[in-house]
Image (spheres, rainbow, N blue to C red):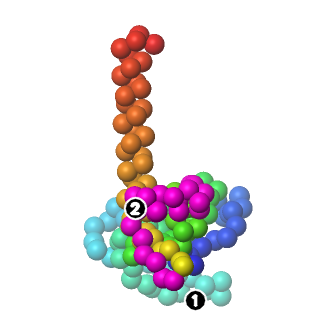
């Protein structure tokens, strides 16, 4: 599997509250200038360890904590990942057979190894953005028609 599940269950109320507080506190720390930050981790035994982490990783951590605080799970996919057709279909919120039809129409590039298709994560994200843009254009057109008709 190309995607890595950070958590395979929904966070409980306590975890959601901790994540919400953590995201706020981390965001406050990131207001400080610099390319990296030193954070301190304290073990349950009281031992502490300082770790230098890039600011970009801490920004991702804020996003992760925000998602968890909303009661959702998180998965991380490397940008150069090759996805199975099922993983790609899940990202696009469509059935695997529908994705296969789209692939067969060459709307999304893919590679084949034997009888298995692999799709690049970046291509799935690009297609998802194209779908979103088409939907927004259609909504704009409907809104202008409503305006013209006085609805």
Task: Return the mark for residue 138.
Answer: none
Instruction: Kindly indicate whether the residue at mark 1 contacts the one at mark 2 (C-beta within 8 angstroms).
Output: no
- CA–CA distance in space, label 2 to label 1: 56 Å
- Stretch in magenta: 93-114
The residue sitting at 32% across, 65% down in the picture is 32
- Indicate which disc, 2 or 1, sits on the residue closer to the N terminus: 1
Residue 69: % across, % down:
59, 57
* Label 1 Cα neighbours within 10 Å, binned few <14 / some 14-19 / many ≥20: few
In the rendering, at what x and y percent does residue 10 appear? 69, 62
Pinpoint residue 40: horizontal percent, then vertical percent.
48, 80
**Which residue ends up furthest to the top in the rendered image?**
150
Q: At x 43% / y 84%, what residue is drawn? A: 51
Is residue 65 left or right of 127 when viewed as pictured? right
State the residue at coordinates (58%, 89%). 47
Residue at position x 40%, y 24% in the image: 143
Residue in front for this viewpoint, 123 or 27: 123
Q: Is residue 87 found inside the magenta-colored segment of the image?
A: no
Q: Is residue 133 above or below residue 88?
A: above
Q: Please indicate whether residue 15 sits to the left or right of residue 112 in the image.
A: right
Residue 24 seen? no
Which tag is nearer the camera, tag 2 or tag 1? 2
Q: Quadrant of the N terminus?
A: bottom right
Nearest to the observer: residue 70 or residue 110: 110
Query: Which residue was labeled with disc 1?
Result: 47
Q: Residues within 10 Å of mark 2 (few under 14, many from 20)?
A: few
Q: Quadrant of the C terminus?
A: top left
Left or right of residue 63, residue 68 in this image: right
In the picture as drawn, the residue positioned furthest to the left comes out as: 34
Helix, strand or loop at label 1? It is: loop
Which residue lies under the disc numbered 2?
A: 106
Secondary-structure class at tag 2 = loop
């Amino acid at each position: 599997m190309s995607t890595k599940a950070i958590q395979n269950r929904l966070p409980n109320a306590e975890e959601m509250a901790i994540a919400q507080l953590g995201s706020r506190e981390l965001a406050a720390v990131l207001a400080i200038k610099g390319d990296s930050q030193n954070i301190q981790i304290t073990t349950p035994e009281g031992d502490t360890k300082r770790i230098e982490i890039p600011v970009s990783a801490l920004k991702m951590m804020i996003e992760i904590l925000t998602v968890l605080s909303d009661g959702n799970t998180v998965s991380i996919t490397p940008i150069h990942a090759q996805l199975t057709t099922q993983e790609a279909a899940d990202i696009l919120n469509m059935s695997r057979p529908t994705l296969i039809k789209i692939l067969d129409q060459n709307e999304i590039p893919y590679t084949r190894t034997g009888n298995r298709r692999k799709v690049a994560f970046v291509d799935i994200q690009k297609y998802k953005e194209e779908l979103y843009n088409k939907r927004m254009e259609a909504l704009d057109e409907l809104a202008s028609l409503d305006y013209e008709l006085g609805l």
